[in-house]
Amino acid sequence: MQDRWIKSIPVRLTPPALKDNTADVDRLIKGLEKLLGGGEVTMDLSLSRRIPFLLREHHYHMEAVLYQDHSSWRLVDVFPPTESGSVYGVVVDLGTSVIALRLLDLVTGEVKEESSFLNPQIQAGSDILTRIHFAGQEGGLRKLQTLVLMRLNEEIHSMAQRREIATQKIVGASVAGNTTMTHFFLGLDPYWICRDPYIPVLNRPGLIRAGELGLGIHDRGGVLIFPNAGSYFGGDLIAGILASGMNHQEEVSILVDVGTNAEVVLGNREWLVACAGAAGPALEGGVANMGMMAGPGVIDKVLIDPATGEFHVTTIKDSPPVGICGSGMIDLVAQLYLAGMIDIRGKYVPEKCSDRIQAIDGVQHLTVVFSKDSGTGEALTLSQAEIDTLLRSKAAMHTILTTLTRMIHLEWKDFRKFYVAGTFGSYINPRSAIVLGMLPDLPLDAYDALGNTSLAGATKALLSLRKREEMDEIRNRVTYVEMNVNQEFMNAFSAAKFIPHTDRSLFPTVP
Amino acid sequence: MQDRWIKSIPVRLTPPALKDNTADVDRLIKGLEKLLGGGEVTMDLSLSRRIPFLLREHHYHMEAVLYQDHSSWRLVDVFPPTESGSVYGVVVDLGTSVIALRLLDLVTGEVKEESSFLNPQIQAGSDILTRIHFAGQEGGLRKLQTLVLMRLNEEIHSMAQRREIATQKIVGASVAGNTTMTHFFLGLDPYWICRDPYIPVLNRPGLIRAGELGLGIHDRGGVLIFPNAGSYFGGDLIAGILASGMNHQEEVSILVDVGTNAEVVLGNREWLVACAGAAGPALEGGVANMGMMAGPGVIDKVLIDPATGEFHVTTIKDSPPVGICGSGMIDLVAQLYLAGMIDIRGKYVPEKCSDRIQAIDGVQHLTVVFSKDSGTGEALTLSQAEIDTLLRSKAAMHTILTTLTRMIHLEWKDFRKFYVAGTFGSYINPRSAIVLGMLPDLPLDAYDALGNTSLAGATKALLSLRKREEMDEIRNRVTYVEMNVNQEFMNAFSAAKFIPHTDRSLFPTVP
């Protein structure tokens, strides 16, 4: 794809003469406009001041870095000519829990390095509502913004250092996050986002100068901020749609991004409908006693032999088991069901659980890993309450999917592709999710785990003008549907709490 | 003229609702775009941050101030609704010696106040070359810029205070000056302006945000900087052409701006040719012993009775005479010639000067005002050397006019209008200038004194988009001609040193 909107182009100017006394800045602009073949070139006064020196220092032969803003080009800087003309960009996924970033070569499109870190705003509150409240306190918003920016700038700085790249050569960025995270990032007050009628400060931040934002790349670099379609439909999901390409396909696809919220998009090249709902925190680490985020020793796969009742657990890096992540939980509960250790209500069937089951304070607990095999020295157990929480989450997910699908008069079989985004999507075993009745009973090859779609979409938009424009098109095309939690929804939710569902015909392949 | 490019428009928005959850900033932008009927509206991130508060504080009913930059509108600020919706602008003429400014009501176009002050850069050098040299020293450029900005901001502040206008309500400015003064103002290094091949840093500064510049008006106000057509053809002269309207006329006119340089423009609605040359400092105050800038007691008119040899001098404010200004000098020398007290070479004819003439150190001095009538207590005298200087200046002016006119194959009689700009032009008696052979022997009604055309043109461009565009059109249309000081020029110059000229046929009305 060669429709870059950030360009580094070599420029060679005729030096001034008595017969051609065009000013330095105008000479450079004229030369660039000719090379670009369209669109006006502009620059900051601060850069204008340095142009006479730069032209003469480089003998009128330089590498000019520009980015396209609407119909005009902004000159970022002028560098000495190099072989590669390489300049770099940063792509950021502003997650509520984890912030991921990439360093890109903007000429070749190559990913130079990728990294992620815990969102330091967690110290002000792990969930978004606590942070919105925190932002309302004196200096709170500024603090939240600074926390992210400082940590991000640190990370950009070390990446650049490791790659031996001057931060002055990082001349652009692309940032996608949910609406509130984007507000924090831009220093915009999220007060009205969580209050009726749920109004963001702005929908389309567009391109912002890095210096105005405080992002640690070239001061005059352009930072593309993904737009949102409302308080509950953020730039991360728009990036997700962009990454999946579902907006180009003739067939209808579905995209699900599971985090604290389950965000769902249905559509094709003609229409896009989206909705979000609380999927419940059980799908992230942190609710089950032994629940945690993916890491060494974390159980990500479970197999139970229905004949012997034997457990085979697989952990990340094959370390001794220390806990379980969301995808491991789904495997585990699906396997418990298939082995008959829990019934369709998700309740333990003690006579099937042999020596693994015991009641603690009147609540049944199943030992998944005995203490002798555990990396913590203690047994890893799963309580009835934890299963109930998971089933509520899966029921919420199922109900959101069903309700949305019915609202637009489609059936599951109409979906050709089912994209699952996020870390969760990369680890989940779709078959287990189908067994639980969490995901629709589609052929397994319909499922496509896309990984971090926020990062993938933001990368596309940073490298291509067409994709950047598509970003806005998606925003304008998507219809956001408020999920109405009425009696009908609650009935559907109750039916979906069973494994896989009260209506078995919805899951013909599940025994 | 209602094609304002800075506008204050009342806007009333529908408050948000669950069914209409457009973000605050987008809601305002959408509302404004509808009212403006074309062109995108954009705003700074810094303003975006305040919009949610402003919308709610003013109950979605406000006065929005915007300015047009290319095809888009920049939002400067949002104010509570007022009756008049008045906002203000500042117009600045950046003179080398004197800086003049105006406070304008941008709605009515009315001039609220006008003022001027000595350019404080004079402390770094009274002439432009000394200042360019000063700018080359460590911190020199910054110092020159700061001197003007601080003094200007002081003046703007007092003007606003006297008129009881908040400086936040001064939302735009328009600035015209010669190329070097404009460079100082923008903090651009003028080093190459005075060095072969004479290259400015930039020709078209365009619109700059007041905050970026440090101008003491609204931080987000737009400052229009007049472009230059080269090192020796500045924005002040482009403003002059704009003020005269000569670029619209079918007939050919001439515009002369006399300062340290004589700047001359010839042309009509089809073509414009300009040139500048050193007219000599005799036309400004400061060379003659008794020369000074206009002020109380300064002689601005002289009449000599050829029969009696009696002098009638008129002074500014009718105060006792203390000195003479450029226009008074021209009157005086023309009258001396008509009274036969000097000959066509400008030499004193002692026998015609009665008791007024005396030699001091071998140089003839004529007493213009005897000590008893003088405001200084001492006689005001005019030496032969001072007359010689004036005649060199007038010869330079004449030669420039003649040379340029001949270069484009025209004759003086082809000019329908002869515009004289500057303070000099406002005070000069054209008849006296014709008698001296300084200005062409045209009918007196062809002469039109325009006053400060730099200020007048900058005012027009601040109030009208059409005029602002015309400013750039003029810049692009004008052909700057280098005055070649060759033997031919020197011959013409020698002939022009006589009163009125060696070729009397050029001045048929002069006795």
Image (cartoon, coloured by chain):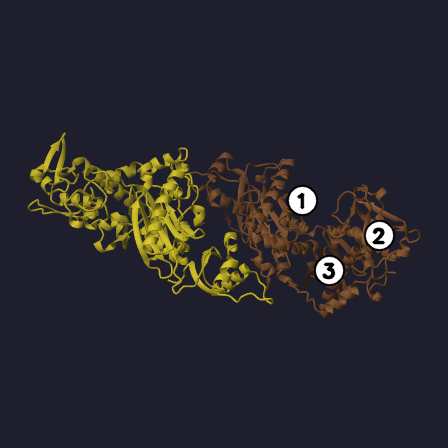
Chain colours: A yellow, B brown
- Identify which residue, B173 or B51, lies in the foreground: B173
Q: Is residue A456 left or right of residue A13?
A: left
Q: Is residue B471 above or below residue B30?
A: below
Residue at x 28% of width, y 52% of height: A451
Please give the chain letter of the residue carrying mark 1. Answer: B
Residue type for callout 3: Ile
Residue ID for mark 2 = B366
Crowding near pointer 3: few (<14 within 10 Å), some, many (20+)?
Answer: many
Please give the chain letter of the residue carrying mark 3. Answer: B
Crowding near pointer 2: few (<14 within 10 Å), some, many (20+)?
Answer: many
Mark 2 or mark 3, which has the lower sequence index? 3
Q: Is residue A273 visible?
A: no
On the image, the x and y values in percent for residue B498 come to 81, 63
Q: Is residue A27 above or below residue A434?
A: below
Q: CA distance from mark 2 to mark 3?
A: 35 Å
Q: Given contact means CB atoms under 8 Å apart, are the residues at marks 3 and 1 in contact?
A: no
Q: Is residue A346 above or below residue A448?
A: above
Residue ID for mark 3 = B254
Determine if marks 1 and 2 fall on one subunit: yes
Residue ID for mark 1 = B117
* Outermost residue to the front: B361
